[in-house]
Image: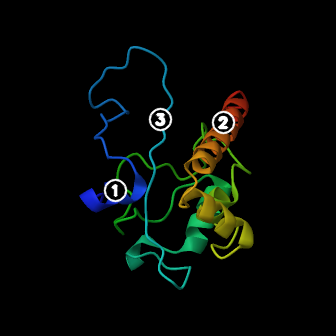
């Protein structure tokens, strides 16, 4: 949960966003939607904060194979529109950053590369932070555009 102290710590405020996948539709044009699942990872670096949600190993395999996890981040079964195979429009984006690779289970969170990026992202050098975000975002967008022509 984002609280007032977070705004002071991170230097920005949270703004509620409209639901991007049709709740306020219909869409008047083509759009690409990314629906993230945020989860906490305790110190053991394997089990999620909600044990029923699965493990980091399962998340890594799901990202590698571009398939669904056995459960949602809340630990409940996937109920709506799940397909038993790789989603045909799924795209692979690799190498955006060491931190992204750690989130996907490709690197450990205590990797020197990851720790270095975290120090930039949460450090006091605002220019370095913005450069990191812009560079990572540009790489991600270019990789997504390249991958989308393959689907």
Q: Which residue is mark 1?
A: 8
- When asked about the image quadrant of residue 22, the answer is top left
- When asked about the image quadrant of residue 3, the answer is bottom left
Q: Earlier in the sequence, mark 2 or mark 1?
A: 1
The CA distance from mark 3 to mark 1 is 30 Å
Tag 3's secondary structure? loop
The CA distance from mark 3 to mark 2 is 17 Å
Vertical order, 38 against 95 (above or below): below
- Specify few, some or many for label 1: CA neighbours under 10 Å numbering under 14, 14-19, or 20 or more: few
Is 55 positioned to the left or the right of 138 in the image? left
Which residue is painted at 68% across and 45% down in the image?
Answer: 92
Q: Which residue is mark 2?
A: 138
Q: Which mark is residue 33?
A: 3
Vertical order, 131 against 62 (above or below): above
Q: Which mark is residue 128?
A: none
Q: Are marks 2 and 1 in contact (CB under 8 Å)?
A: no
Is 38 positioned to the left or the right of 103 in the image? left
């Amino acid at each position: 949960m984002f609280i007032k102290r977070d705004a002071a710590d991170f230097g920005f405020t949270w703004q509620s966003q409209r639901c991007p996948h049709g709740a306020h539709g219909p869409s008047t044009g083509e759009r690409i939607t990314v629906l993230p699942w945020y989860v906490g990872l305790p110190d053991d670096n394997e089990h999620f904060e909600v044990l029923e949600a699965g493990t980091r190993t399962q998340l890594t395999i799901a990202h590698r194979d571009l398939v669904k996890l056995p459960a949602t981040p809340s630990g409940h079964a996937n109920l709506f529109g799940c397909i038993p195979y790789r989603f045909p429009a799924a795209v692979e984006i690799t190498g955006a950053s060491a931190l992204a690779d750690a989130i996907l289970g490709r690197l450990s969170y205590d990797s020197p590369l990851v720790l270095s990026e975290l120090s930039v992202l949460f450090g006091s050098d605002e220019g370095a932070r913005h450069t990191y975000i812009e560079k990572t975002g540009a790489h991600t967008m270019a990789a997504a555009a390249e991958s989308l022509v393959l689907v």
